[in-house]
Image (cartoon, grey):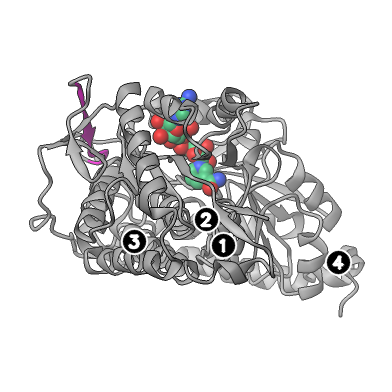
Amino acid sequence: MTDPDRTDRAADRPSSDLMKRETAVEKARQKTAALALEFGKAWEYAPAPETPDHVKLEERYQLFIGGKWMPPKSGKYFDTVSPSTEQTLAQVAEGNAEDVDRAVKAARHAYDKYWGKMRGAERAKYVFRIARALQEKARELAIVETMDGGKPIKESRDVDIPLASAHFFYNAGWADKLDYAFHGRKVRPLGVAGQVIPWNFPLLMAAWKIAPAIACGNTVVLKPAETTPLTALLLAQIIEEAELPPGVVNIVTGAGETGAALVGHPDVNKVAFTGSTDVGKKIQRAIAGSGKRLTLELGGKAANIVFADAPLDQAVEGIVGGIYFNQGHVCCAGSRLLVEESVHDIVVRKLKDRMATLRLGDPLDKNTDVGAINSRAQLERIKELVLSGEREGAERFSAPCELPSKGFWFPPTFFTNASQSCRIAREEIFGPVLTIMTFRTPDEAIEKANNTMYGLSAGIWTDKGSKIFHVATRLQAGVIWANTYNKFDPSSPFGGYKESGFGREGGRQGLAAYLEVQ
Ligand code: NAD
């Protein structure tokens, strides 16, 4: 194996001949790309919109409690709006503390009377049924996810929905094998789980929460995010059709107050929260001393580290996928790019070329790479942080794309010449904005990557396996990808360090979060 320290040596850096050749190739590529854009609009595709005609949304959605659809006690409803058109898609019930109480009572009843005592093999049948129904309704779910959240249909179709179904399949498989999951130790469910999720992966986050919880014998009250409640409500319809016993899964829609009522309910045994670090801290304070079990999946400011010996085109594709394909609405988005100084200019040029080919627009179009920003509030936050980057002296580049006149949009953007103290290098932007910084040695890359309050994920790009191990073992991040980025599997645990939270979702570790392991 290569000695990792060798990476500092000049021998490992590209020779000046190689650099010159790369530069010449890049110049030729740029010229060709510019000509293609000018004469043929070579990168444009004919529109290929997915039709939402067969999707039937209800005008109003109620709360799903104890297996029944119930109006909220407050009588209030809120609009859920498509971020790409600003049209109201449906009205959704605003659950209050009384509704949360009804839901927790239904969940407790279901746990005590049947679900907590049911044999694992029996529970598995229901969980498998939900997994299959998600596959059968995948197209409809993908369309609704895209309409409600603004993400490109190719993301919801190829990532969100298949992974949501995979999580139900994976956990269903464990339901009758829990006694073997922890090497001779006895396990039992915790009771009622109160679960609160964010807007960036609405159905997938619901699956990450509900599937392991019910497979392990717990019952659930889930609160989806207020800007993207629709697919969780469609999931409730699927759960109803799967004839899951009443009260095993309850869905209460609403905003922060509803979430606070749920996590603070005295009869909830386990709280599972995914969302911002600020709200995660509030929840931790609110339930301190209550004896409730807690897992927190919070924000991130991941570093993608690109060494000079990396396959640079592959790395650029990973960088683009890691920050632009989902509008940067990903907790593990690679929003800091640390690039070895000797290849900085090449990487920046390649990135600009690739960004010129990104298609931003109608998220329902199958060719769209970059969709809409989830809400006006999120767009304002992105704009404010980008302005702070400009004010702090970093250099901004935005992809040359036209923004639609209606809806919430932000062009793929990066900053160079940014210092580590800039807000854009420290704060989670949760938008398609990348901050590029350089390093000279692996140690400097590690130090810069770890210089954040977060510790969710990171990426390493190099052709040397020894360097991957050397760097990965020193990075403070729960998930580290090597020569790829943003890849998920239900059998791999996911979760953070430091202010990115604690606890793991996925894999056996994800089961442990819903079990008393004796
Ligand atoms: P958010 O914290 O504003 O809201 C998340 C959820 O919490 C929503 O359902 C919201 O209604 C609810 N909520 C708000 N205040 C609450 C309170 N006091 N008590 C209980 N619930 C409350 O986050 P967001 O803007 O919806 O999502 C973006 C954040 O989520 C980002 O920081 C992102 O990094 C994080 N995230 C993390 C992961 C992960 O796995 N680590 C995954 C996805 C998103």
Q: Nearer the viewer, residue 352 or 374?
A: 374
Q: Which residue is mark 2?
A: 322
Give the quadrant of residue 287: top right
Do the numbered discs 1 and 4 sit on residues whose CB atoms are within 8 Å? no
Mark before the other along the chain sequence, 2 or 4:
4
User: What is the distance, in whole Å, between disc 1 and disc 4 at their CAs?
Assistant: 22 Å
Some atom of ligand 1 lies within 8 Å of the CB belonging to the residue at label 4? no
Q: Under 8 Å from ligand 1: the CB of mark 2?
A: no
Residue at 22% x, 35% y is 81
Q: Earlier in the sequence, mark 1 or mark 3?
A: 3
Which is nearer the N-term, disc 1 or disc 4? 4
Which residue is denoted by mark 3 in the rendering? Answer: 161
Q: CA distance from mark 2 to mark 4?
A: 25 Å
Which stretch is magenta? 76-84
Q: On the image, numbered disc 4 is attached to which residue?
A: 7
Give the residue number, with chain letter if any, for mark 1.
485
